[in-house]
Structure formats: structure tokens, C-alpha cells
Image (cartoon, rainbow, N blue to C red):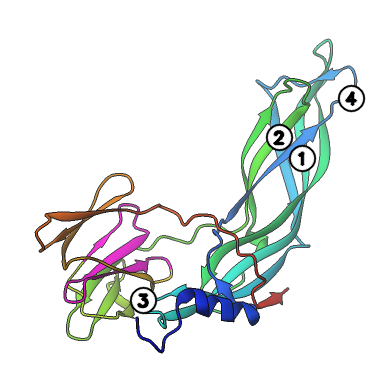
Amino acid sequence: MRNNMLSFKEKAGAAQEDCLCFCEEEASREAMFQAPIELPEGFVVDPAEAVANVTWNADSLSCVIERCFIETGPEPDEIGVQFAVRLQGTVTLLVSVSPVRNQYGQGDGSVSVIRNAEIDQVVYYSDEPDDCPDVSDITIENLVVVPPFYGSPLSVTGTIVLVPEPDHRSYVFTANTGDSTVSVIDADVNTLVSTISLSDIPTDLGVTLDKAYTYVLHRNANLVSIINNETLTVTQTIPLVGAPRKIQFETGENLLIFSQEAAPFMKLIFPRKPLPIRSRCHPLRTILP
């Protein structure tokens, strides 16, 4: 580490004075809900035939843009800025269950309740400072009617899809040793869509089995860069103990990096998602309607 450089912790502490944090909170595009339903006395619902229906109103949701730090390289000064897109507020749900029958099995009615789902979560990270989603795209999925048990009433559970998953495009990544970049080609239209700058010469690369990330090897610098295939940005650069020569992904969460050193390979295990660490400080934010 250079003497005139601050460590990440030192920079983080200084940044907190200006209300900036690292992008550590786990992003989720979905929120679960559960709506208990008390049936009128003398009426029953057969869970085997029950059908749930939900209508909703998300007019009270607000989009909050929070600036935060990301590591862009192994050096202490290699820090970039991204924007956490947070949704805050309430989704009002009108939850209905039918058919509702009397104790003799007669009738074909329904029963409804109104429930508010409180929302306060980062839905995704973006490179743009005004990349808010359209809340009119919210949908409800995975509705399940849960029968009463151990004194608990009948209930309906489901998933609020706050932001739909983006369309997965088919990319081809090529390592360019001449200018230390990776070219990204849209395979559907055979067009160059992005050129990603790297900290050193790329010597090999591999894409994870779920197509979410691309790992780029830097043999001359003993580094591995990680590219987020959704944002097409370098999210992390990892120093290694030896020169990486080849990369291979196993089923599950294992990543094999073969080295030219005495050891045949280095085996690294990465979680599929970042750990859900919630920052204790309050990032700079812009509230958009």
C-alpha cells in the first residue's frame, strides 16, 4: 500500500462524515406479504378449492436515489460511485378469497381484507443518478391460500414484484490485450454495445454458469476482475497469490483458477449473492416522485 493512500476503512470513515457509504445492502426486486383473513362466524373456506385474488395501489411509493461507493480495483484509491435505487412507502393490497360457503356447504361468496405492505429496500444498483423504476409495472405473483392452523386464521401469502427482471440479452465478451479492455457484443444483433476498461492486460476470461458475472484474468498482474453482466461494469478486482492462467466454473458456487505456480490450481468459493449487510449511515439521497 502506498504511504500517501488512505485505506478503505479510513476513506469510509471520512466519507460517512459526508453521508456516503459503501454499496453493501443486498438488492431485491421482490417483497413478500401475508394477509390474515378472519371469516364471518358460520362461514368456511375449503383451502383445496379456494382461489385468491389481489388488487393493489402503489401511489404512495417513492423512489430514493442513494449515492454509495464500490471497489473498482485492488488499490485503496480505486473507488467508484454507484447509485442505490430504493423504493420506500406503502403498497395497499385488497386481498380476496373465494368461494366462501356456509356451514352446510351452500353459497358462493367471497371475503376481502385491506392490508398495507411497508416497503423500504434497495431494488437494484445503477450507474445513472436518476434511474428510477416505473411503479406501474408492479405485479403480484405466487399467491397461496394458507389454511388456519394452531389458532392462526386463514391467510393469503404472495410476492410483490416491485421491479421486473430486465430482459436477459445474449452477450459475447472478448479480451483485448492491446488496450486492456473487454469488448461486449450483443449476439442477437452482432453489434458492439460496450467497451469496458480494465486495470491491466486481460489474458483470459470466463462467464459464470448463471450468466450473471464475467471473470477476467490478468496473468501479468496476478489479478482477477469481476464484471457485472447486467450493468457491464467492473465491480471488483481480486489480488491472487500467483499468476492466473485458466479459469473454470464448477456446478454450485466453486470457481477454479489454474495457476502457473507450483500449485496446480487455486480454488475460490464465492457466494452467489452479496451478504445482506445493511449500512448504519444515511447516504446522500435524492427523492424522486
Between discs 3 and 1, the one toward the N terminus:
3
The disc label shown at residue 73, or none? 3
* Residue hosting label 1: 95
Residue 256 visible at all: yes
* Residue 244 image position (x, y, % from top left): 17, 65
Going from N to C along the chain, the mark reached first, 4 or 2, is 4
| Circle nearer the N terminus (4, 1) | 4
| Nearest to viewer (mark 3 / mark 4) | 3
Q: Is residue 108 left or right of residue 246?
A: right
What quarter of the picture does the C terminus occupy?
A: bottom right
Q: Secondary structure at mark 4?
A: loop
Q: Amino acid at mark 2?
A: Val
Q: Which residue is mark 4?
A: 40
Foreground tag (3 vs 1): 3
**Which amino acid lies under the numbered mark 3 shown in the image of this protein?**
Gly
Eyeballing the image, is 174 above or below 90?
below
Is 91 placed above or below 169 here?
A: above
- x%, y% of residue 133? 61, 67
Q: Earlier in the sequence, mark 3 or mark 4?
A: 4
The residue drawn where x is 70% and y is 75% is 288
Residue beneath label 2, please?
A: 156
Q: Residues within 10 Å of mark 2 (few under 14, many from 20)?
A: many
Disc 3 and disc 2: Cα gap in Å? 46 Å
Disc 3 crowd, CA 10 A, few/some/many (<14, 14-19, 20+): many
Residue 40: x %, y % from top left: 89, 25
User: Is disc 1 placed on a helix, strand or loop?
Assistant: strand
- Describe residue 7's horizontal placement relative to residue 181 as left or right: right
Q: Which tag, 3 or 2, sits closer to the chain's start?
A: 3
**225 within the magenta span:** yes
Magenta residues span 205-230
Q: CA distance from mark 4 to mark 2?
A: 16 Å
